[in-house]
Structures are given as C-alpha cells and as structure tokens.
Image (spheres, coloured by chain):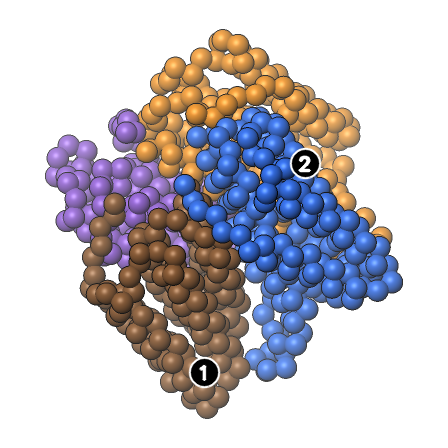
Chain colours: A purple, B orange, C blue, D brown
Amino acid sequence: MSKDRMIAFSDGVLAIVITIMVLKLEIPQSPEFLSLRGISANFLAYILSYVYVGIYWVNHHHMFGNLDYVSRKVLWKNLLWLFSITLIPMATEWVGFNPFEKWPTMFYGIILLICACSYFYLQREVIKISDYDLNSGKGTFKDSKAKFSIIAYIIATIFALKFTVVSYLIYTFVAIIWIFQGKVFKSE
Amino acid sequence: MSKDRMIAFSDGVLAIVITIMVLKLEIPQSPEFLSLRGISANFLAYILSYVYVGIYWVNHHHMFGNLDYVSRKVLWKNLLWLFSITLIPMATEWVGFNPFEKWPTMFYGIILLICACSYFYLQREVIKISDYDLNSGKGTFKDSKAKFSIIAYIIATIFALKFTVVSYLIYTFVAIIWIFQGKVFKSE
Amino acid sequence: MSKDRMIAFSDGVLAIVITIMVLKLEIPQSPEFLSLRGISANFLAYILSYVYVGIYWVNHHHMFGNLDYVSRKVLWKNLLWLFSITLIPMATEWVGFNPFEKWPTMFYGIILLICACSYFYLQREVIKISDYDLNSGKGTFKDSKAKFSIIAYIIATIFALKFTVVSYLIYTFVAIIWIFQGKVFKSE
Amino acid sequence: MSKDRMIAFSDGVLAIVITIMVLKLEIPQSPEFLSLRGISANFLAYILSYVYVGIYWVNHHHMFGNLDYVSRKVLWKNLLWLFSITLIPMATEWVGFNPFEKWPTMFYGIILLICACSYFYLQREVIKISDYDLNSGKGTFKDSKAKFSIIAYIIATIFALKFTVVSYLIYTFVAIIWIFQGKVFKSE
C-alpha cells in the first residue's frame, strides 16, 4: 500500500506541475494572427519542460514498477525530488518571458541539474532497498545516461553566460536522448 | 500496474485541464445582473471545452478498459495526446475573450484537430499491442467517427476565415455526435 | 475497473475545485491586522463552499460504495454533476467580493440548486442500474433530504432578491443538516 | 474501499496545496541576477511550507497504513484537517510578501497551530476506531511530539509580536524534529 500511495502522490504532483505551466501560458493579447508570436517563446519553453516532466514520469514509473516496498527514507527522498520538480514551472516562466537572457537560461539549467541530482539520489536509495538492478542491462545504460545528463547540464549552465543558444541546444539534446531509448516493458 | 499508473496520471491531467478552464473564468466585474453578459462567451466556450474533455475521458476510459499491458510507446503516445489536451484551456480562453474573431476560432479548431490526430495515433498503437478490436462492432463505428471528426475540424477551421458561426456549429455538432452513442458497457 | 476510474476522476475534480477556491483567496493587501477584515467575506464564502463540496464528496463516496458496475449513462451523468460542481468556485468568488448583494447571492443559490438537481439526476440513474436501495433505511432519509434541499435552495434564491441574510442562513442551515447525520458505515 | 478513496482524495488535496504555493511564486521581474533577491523570502516560505505539507503527508500515510476501516466521523475529521491544510498557501504567501512583519508571522503560526490541532483531533478518532496503538513504541513518541509541536506553535505565535526571527526559528526547528525520526516502515 505504501508504495501505491507514494506513486499516486507523485503522479498528482507531476500532473499539476505540467498543468501549472499551461496556466502560466498567457493568451495572445489581441485576436490577430501575429499576436501568437508574442507567446512563442513561452510556448517553446512549455514544450521543453513538458518533455522533461514526461521523461521523469516514465522513468519514475519504470523504477518503482520493480519495487516491492518503500522505506521512510525513500518517501523523503521522493519528496525532495518532487520539490525540485515543482521549481520547473517558475524556471520555465522566467525563461519564457526572457529567452536568450543570461540569468534565466542559467537558472533553468540549474533547476534541471537539481532535478537530475535529486532523482539520482532517490535512485541510489531505491537500489539500496530493492532488487532493482541498475548494473544489468537497461539499468547500466540509464545510470551512465544520468551521469551524462548531469555533466551536460553543468556545461549548458556555463554556456548560458555567453551563448544561450548553445544551452538550449544542450537541454533539447539531452531530452531527445532520454525519449528515444527504444525499449518496451510490459506491465505486470 | 503500469497501466493503472498511466490511467491515474491521465485522469489527473484531464481533471486539472477542466479545472484550469474554470480558474480562467473571471467573475463578473460588478454585482449587477447584466454584468453576467460580459462573461457569457467565456462561459459557452468553457461548456464546449468541458464536453470535449469529457468525451475524451469516456473514450480513453473505454479504450484502456480492454487493455492488459502497456508498452513504452503507448506511454509516450499517451503523453503526446495529453500534451495536445493541455492546449485546450489556452484556446478556450482566447476564443472566450474574442468570440467570432477569425484567428482564435481557427486556433481552437486546430487544437481540436491536433487532439483528434494524437488520439488517433495513440489508438493505432493501442490496437497494435492489444486485442482491442477496432474493426468489430462498436470499434468500427468509433474509427469512422474519428476520421469524420478530423475532416469536420479541418472544414471548420477553413470556415473560420469567413464564417466563424459555422465553425462553432461544426464544433458543437461533432461533440453531440460523440456523446449520443447509446452504448452501455459494464465494468469488470 | 470502470467504477474505480470514475471515482478517481471525480475525486480529482473535487479536490481541485476545493483548492481553486483557496487559490482565489487573496492575501490581505498590507501586513496590518485589520487588513484581514478585507478578506473575511471571501473567507466565510470559502468555508461554506468547502463544506458543500465536502458533503457531496462524502455522499458520492457512500453512493458508489454500494455499486458494482457503471454504465455509460452513469459516466455522463457524473460528468454533468461534476460540471455543476466546477461552477461553485466562480459563484463563491463573486459572493465573496460582493457579500449581501442581490445577484451574486442569488447566483450562488442557483449554482447550489443546479448541483443538487444534477446530483439527484445522477442518483436516479445509479438506483436504476444497481441494488443501491434508496427506499430502505438510510436511503429514504437521504432522498427526502435531497428534495428538501432543492426546495430550500429555491426559497433562498427568492429571498436573495430582498433579504440576502436569510439566503445565507438557509444555505448554512442546509449544510448543517447534511453534516450531522449520525451514521457510521464501514468500508469493505 | 472507503479508506482508499479517502486517502486518494487527501493525496489529491495535499498535492494541489503544494503546487498552489508554487503557482503563487512569482518570477523575478527582470532577467537580472539580483532580481532573484526579490523573491527569496517567498522562496524560503515556500520551502518551509513544502516541508510541513510533506511531514503531514508522511504521517497521514503512516497513520492510515494501519487502519482497516473508516467511519463517517473519520471522513469528516479528515475533511476538517484538509481544510486547515488548505489555509497554508495563503499564510505562506502573506508571510512571503511580508517577512518579519508581526501579523503575517503570527498568522502563519496560528495556521500551523490549527493544522496540528485538527490533525491531533483526527488522530484521536482514528485511535478510537482502530487498533492503531498510539501508546506503544513509535506511537507514544509521536503523540508527545504532537503535543510538543502544539506548545511550540503557541510560543512562536507569541514571539511573533516582538521577535519574528524567533518565531521562524521555532517553525523550522519543529519541522526538523519531525523529519528526522530515523524510522523505517515497510509497505504491505
């Protein structure tokens, strides 16, 4: 039961994080076609953040699918990870209103970095208490990908100081890598 | 389990999409009776969008009721469909504040079209991996209805350029067709 | 399964309706103590609406606890009822900003009336397809209470034209009747 | 079933309460680095409130993990507790915009006090109807901690009149005590 409830709570928070970002999408100020341009940056930022939340959801789904019980520590580390996820809407909004500005771009990268680290930290705890084997097959790949992502976010954050376009390319590139894993798993 | 979690997550997003539209419903600016007129367009747009989300929810409910397992691809195609659904509140708000304007009406139709296409795309994947037979009985009807809807949205979007009223009639007509199917299914 | 999903979706919408009302609660404009007075009407309106949503949730919980399957009609009538519930936040906000004004008070009563009628309509459908016996014991009482509430809302709505205070007293009185039923039921 | 639904509803409300606080976090007004300072108080208040909601979620999770059935009274006392939790976002926002001001700090403490009391009241009801033994092992500790917290909140509320910093230290201190319990429980 404990596991189910943790999963339900996590799903609730993830679902609301996604929809908060929609809520922050302002409508064009006039009924003209060109007024859509004014919200294009916000829209692109929303797409990127939606994809990131989606990736986390799919991975979280996968990670706890193999788990039988949860410890109090897992609950708290999951809450810590959820906390970092709840910061995504704010970062998305700041970036959406200030695309190609140094600090918002950097801030977005830092939030992604915090999410990745807290997820990594949660994953370590999950491995400790379960038979979820990260070193075999799919697992290994994921672990190395997690480390790769963390390094990529750090690089993107540094690039944000001078070349914000490079930062966005890195953010997008990491997201694409996570989506196309080409793996199928069945539900039990 | 995987399936349950995907369904719970989808329900969460759909529930929040509906309530975001309520949140965007502004209250009349004065306590006078006539001030209700100022929000009537928003209110009608809300009703139409609520009905559309309700239709998708009932169909989604039905589609996955017959499914035993989900693949990673279904998860991602479901996320893609949910993404298109999250755009409905923005389209609704824009239409609500600018009824009978060309671009918002067209935009609303395009969003409905995207939702229909991504749902169709999700359904194809579900058929592939399951015994959910779209070509027998209820299924066939639904499939042809899906194609009909897509064509209707395209026509409505074109009409929006000149006769926005026709567009709204088409949107409403398609919604009515979906509601009155006259079918009863039991839960297991 | 169908039933579970319908219940989960309803709970999601009810939970969000409650929290939308919190979201609309504005904070006092200054850090002074007396500034709390400016939000007292909104706060009282929130309490009343929270209690109403709570009552519906408890009754919905009870009604479907005795049900084994759901028909497509139940799904749609449930969606209709949920739609009427989603109008509560708007009515609450309007009343909160314009306490003792004729139209908002009346509007609030009309929304409560719509909720009660759509719930009654849903209940009739549920009775038809299930062994949920409304005419025995607890059931009868509830049915007469539902009819009583509908009449009370109509009276309150009429009173709103002249004596808004009487309307609020009726709204509060009906809520109190529903809370204190003095019945205990066990979960299965 | 009843219990499951109550838990799902509570999780929904808690998840949304957390995310409403994120929604109220405004983005910095300019893309400058220093503009982040303008939202630091809001951010710290968000962290503290997130931790409090997290603590309640973990404890609620634990309390109902040992329960077999729920009575109508538990449903209503749970709704009362949820009501007090829904006031946290408003208190957090007021404190966030007016840090170190007398009344907001006091108001925040009063809301925490109401939450603690309504949770205590819910817990008493749960003990009455279940075999959840508060007087053995873990239970005792928790009960004394609950009483300690209530006293701490009262003291913090009084300190808010003169030394708001002391109030915040107490709020933080109580939160830290609740997190570090060093207990692990397995899910069944």
Can residue C76 be spotted in the picture?
A: no
The amino acid type found where label 1 is placed reads: Thr
Q: Residue at x 44, y 71 (%)?
A: D117
Could you tell me which chain the residue with mark 1 belongs to? D
Residue A182 drawn above or below residue C20: above
Q: What residue sits right under mark 2 in the picture?
A: C121
Residue in front for this viewpoint, D88 or A111: D88
Cα–Cα span, label 2 and label 1: 49 Å
Can residue B75 be spotted in the picture?
A: yes
Quarter placement of the N terminus of chain C: top left
Q: Are marks 2 and 1 on the same chain?
A: no
Q: Give the x, y percent position of residue D102.
A: 50, 84
Q: How many marks?
A: 2
Quarter placement of the C terminus of chain C: top left
**D187 with respect to A19 (left or right):** left
Q: Give the x, y percent position of residue C87.
A: 67, 48
Quarter of the image for residue A83 reads bottom left
Looking at the image, the residue that sits furthest to the front is: C137
Residue in front for this viewpoint, D133 or B108: D133
